[in-house]
Amino acid sequence: MSVPRPEIEALFSERREFAPPPELAAHANAGPDLYREAEADFEGFWAKQAASRLTWSKPWDKVLEWELPYAKWFSGGELNATYNCVDRHVENGLGSKVAYHWEGEPGDVRALTYSDLQREVNKCANALVELGVKTGDRVGIYLPMIPELPIAMLACAKLGAPHVVVFGGFSSDALEGRMIDSEAVALVTSDGAWRNGKVLDLKSAADVAVDHAPTIKNVLVVKRTGNDVAMTEGRDHWWHDTVERQSDQFDPVPVDSEHLLYLLHTSGTTAKPKGIMHTTGGYLTGVSTTHHYIFDIKPEDVYWCAADIGWVTGHSYIVYGPLANGTTSVMYEGAPMFPEPDRWWSIIEKYKVNVLYCAPTAIRAFMKQGEAWPGKHDLTSLRILGTVGEPINPEAWLWYHATIGGSRCPVVDTWWQTETGMILISPLPGVTTLRPGSATVPFPGVSAKVVDADGKEVANGTGGGYLVITRPWPAMLRGIYKDPERYVSTYWRRFPGVYFAGDGCKVDADGYFWLMGRVDDVMKVSGHRISTTEVESALVDHQAVAEAAVVGRSDPVTGEAISAFVILKSHIEPSPALATELREHVAAKIGHIARPKQLLFTPELPKTRSGKIMRRLLRDIAENRTLGDVTTLADSGIVETIRERAGAGESE
Ligand code: WTA
């Protein structure tokens, strides 16, 4: 693990406070008693949620079996995730309620009621069965934000086939790695995706990946953009041919509470993404409970989580949480600023959105565009605002609160991870007094603390340390697919007995948690997790590169931006053209989100005597800061050399 960053020293203290609006507090789903109730008996609390929010086809025998670091929740119980998210709502008379108001980037719209969703999911499930998919098989999904994405996920869950969704902006290499890791038997993709008015060709990327992933026998292709695509006879099937002709009846397959619901890969500190495992009963309990209380969801609400389903935020808070709760959601396909920077605000006005959940990077990008854009629209339907993905700076929080929320709406800053599956630290909007920049306190039933390097709890109000979670929670990851050793070493070895999140944090004198960014070699670029090592391997993969080091430097819009330091092979001359080529090479290997914003050629890299790259120094250089302590450098002159000679690079 790298040395904690200077900001972990907790120098910042934000003083402003916002009490819950009395009217909202009076009718809130959660009152202060929820904390007391959960604290008195956390297993009982989760059992009550699981029993009251979900429909089980077989009751569980035991609420929690905890054999550190492996948890089983509601063992012996059986249920079906899709039955809980769709069918039972139709049975309960909610068939004509809208599940998704979907809007495509070009402006086309589709409203899917719970009955529509049930019918489409059943047809898709029948098509998957026809293509040979069986309960337990993994199915890859590589789609843009179109209704077929949640439909395909729910179809998988209906037959108990774990899905492996890969973000549509990832490259063919990234898709290939995830398909091979999960041994997927089929892939659902589309001809293309709309992004900023242009077509991204997904099918060609999928073809390259499928050629190298021999377990994939069939590919189901949605026609979305109408671009020309090659279809491989016998392997590729158009959705409109194969799904449309299926029966719209499909009996949900009841699965064990601990049956794998999905794998979702995320970056860690090595070049190989981890397949995070989420199972059925505990996960659904966790996401539906947090969605209900944190967003204070009412039956008539229109809720919009503006994330992409390719990330965990979309899995938990566009698909499973809101659908389990029978909520009406908005789903938008395209780029936030397309065709103009008021696209989001026009969507909020049009659908009268009550709850908006998005990332700080989006808020900062809108802030840059000025208040005139939101000012053109009626945003008074909004009642609650949420953020997720990275620390939100108080300026952005206050802008969001005032300009978007009309100073009326509580902002719930929610801390969680792909691994945690559900929100763990967050305000409750009718209970918690907010402090801009703080995710406030652990959710009822969740227990977190901050420890120092020796694992000793840091007393409130005294300083920063490492965030750990000290008791199991129902949506927690059940492991890393096919890599139990990495599961233990990444999360459970650093501080024995507790879950190590990899985030720096301080707790103030009143018990509020202030998240301070990653303490490992993971960057957060526009809220997306990208490993420095993964970008370094992509660079070294280029034939001109001898060695590379990558750091995240702070950026006013994207939070962190990628800076790459590259040593070329001896016979290669640096040039701006080569810098561009290398940046594009990374985009092609991983995806456009990983393209370095800045790339510098350097003759050497600062290393410790043991040969470890000193990223802190590189970060100082990238941010043009005064240098910190360099005494552990193998060659202390190297930093000056890098500073002077780093040239011929390129910045965006
Ligand atoms: C960061 C996203 C501060 C954190 C759901 C965590 C946050 C990582 C917040 C997980 C927040 C997420 N405040 N930091 N409210 N939410 N993070 O897996 O560093 O994409 O470890 O999950 O995002 O990112 P992931």
Image (spheres, rainbow, N blue to C red):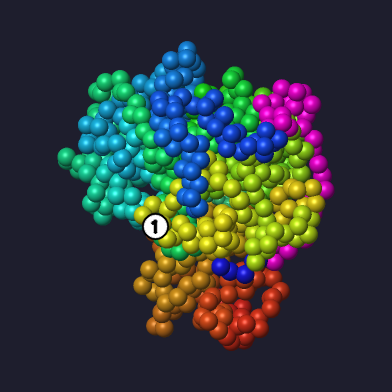
379 relative position to 17: left or right: left
Residue positioned most to the right: 15
Vertical comparison of 498 with 326: above or below: below
Vertical comparison of 267 with 105: above or below: below
Q: Which residue is drawn at 67% across and 33% down?
A: 37
Residue positioned most to the left: 234
| Residue 13 covered by magenta stretch | yes
Please indicate, yes or no, whether residue 194 appears anywhere in the rendered image: no
Report which quarter residue 376 is drawn in: top right
459 relative position to 314: left or right: right
Q: SS for tag 1?
A: loop
Between 500 and 82, the residue placed more toward the observer is 500
Q: Where is residue 304 in the image (x, y as percent from the top left)?
A: 57, 31
Please indicate, yes or no, whether residue 268 appears anywhere in the rendered image: yes
Q: Mark 1 is on which residue type?
A: Asp
Between 446 and 364, the residue placed more toward the observer is 446
Q: Where is residue 524 in the image (x, y as percent from the top left)?
A: 57, 55
| Residue 52 covered by magenta stretch | no
Which residue does the numbered mark 1 point to in the structure image? 483
Q: Does the residue labelled 1 lie within 8 Å of ligand 1?
A: no
Q: Residue at x 26, y 55 (%)?
A: 212
538 relative position to 161: left or right: right
Give neighbour class at mark 1: few <14, some 14-19, many 20+ (Cα, 10 Å). few
Vertical comparison of 359 with 552: above or below: above
Between 359 and 290, the residue placed more toward the observer is 290
The quadrant of the picture occupied by the C terminus is bottom right
Q: Position of residue 440 (x, y in %)?
A: 71, 44
Q: Residue at x 27, y 49 (%)?
A: 210
Dominant SS in magenta: loop
290 relative position to 587: left or right: right
Region of the chain picked out in magenta, as a range:
6-34
